[in-house]
Amino acid sequence: MSLEKRRQIGWIVTLTLAIVAMSVWGYAQNLEVDGTTTVDGDAVINGDMIIGGNLSAGGLIPAGTVLAWPTEVAPDGYLECDGTVYQTADYPDLAAALGNMYGGDGATTFGVPSYRGRFLRTWDHGRAIDPNRTTRSARPDGTAGDNVGTTQSHAMTSHSHGFASNRWRPANTSGGGTSHGAASKTAWTGYSGTSENRPKNKYVMFIIKT
């Protein structure tokens, strides 16, 4: 085959590939998927992505993520943070994230944290904002002190409401003399209030990603 012939064939192949690439690119500008699309590698989107239905992105939220939920029924893929112990085989990703921190044996069973009726407090982590961080009660795996998952009971900063009042004592006439003076007495206020100290609040349910 002559050199000129090979050049012509080369140009034809190049032009064909260019047409195919342009066609694929043209379809990519308006891609519609009616069924399920699985991408095993990276998906790069340089333009806008419009989703007309529901987007399931379970892999974007790691197992163990805790969210506040506004209803009394956890959505699919989540469990209520109520301290329940589950089978590891039923929720392997969550079991791997939690281990036995919140109950279970860490092998065939695991527990989720119990947040019912409690305010959550961020981990002090040695900052010394929490003055009682070293005496916090243990979580289900026995770990206590300044660690995530430990608890505290209700408390109030030490204080008092006493006040001193002076009053005149009666004259002392014993022994033929008289004297008057002030007697000091500490008085206390009466009891008033509710059964706990709390800010204004509203219930939510804490849920955890499986």
Image: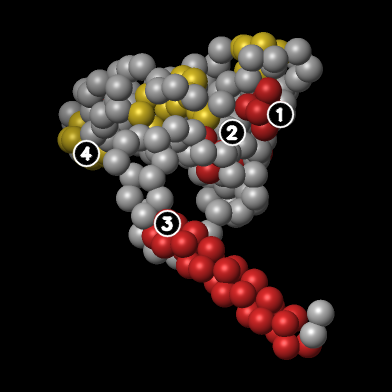
- Disc 2 marks a residue whose amino acid type is Ala
Residue 118 placement: quadrant: top left
Q: Nearer the N terminus, badge 4 or badge 2?
A: 2
Around disc 1, counting alpha carbons within 10 Å, would you say few (fewer than 14), some (14 to 19), or many (20 or more)?
Answer: some
Mark earlier in primary sequence (1, 4)? 1
In the picture of the structure, the residue carrying the numbered disc 2 is: 63
Disc ID at residue 166: 4
Callout 1 touching callout 4 (CB < 8 Å): no
Residue closer to the observer: 198 or 195: 198
Q: Quadrant of the N terminus?
A: bottom right
How far apart are labels 2 and 3 at the CA level? 36 Å
Q: Amino acid at mark 4?
A: Asn
Describe the element under mark 1 as helix, strand or loop.
Answer: helix
The residue under the point 36% across, 55% down is 30
Label 1 close to label 2 by CB (< 8 Å)? yes
Tell me: residue 59, above or below residue 92.
below
Q: Which residue is mark 1?
A: 96
Hey, which residue is sitting farthest right in the picture? 1
Name the mark on residue 169. none
Q: Amino acid at mark 1?
A: Ala
- Look at the numbered disc 4 and give the secondary structure of its residue: strand
Q: CA distance from mark 1 to mark 4?
A: 68 Å
Residue labelled with disc 3: 27
Q: Are marks 2 and 3 in contact (CB under 8 Å)?
A: no
In front: label 1 or label 4: 1
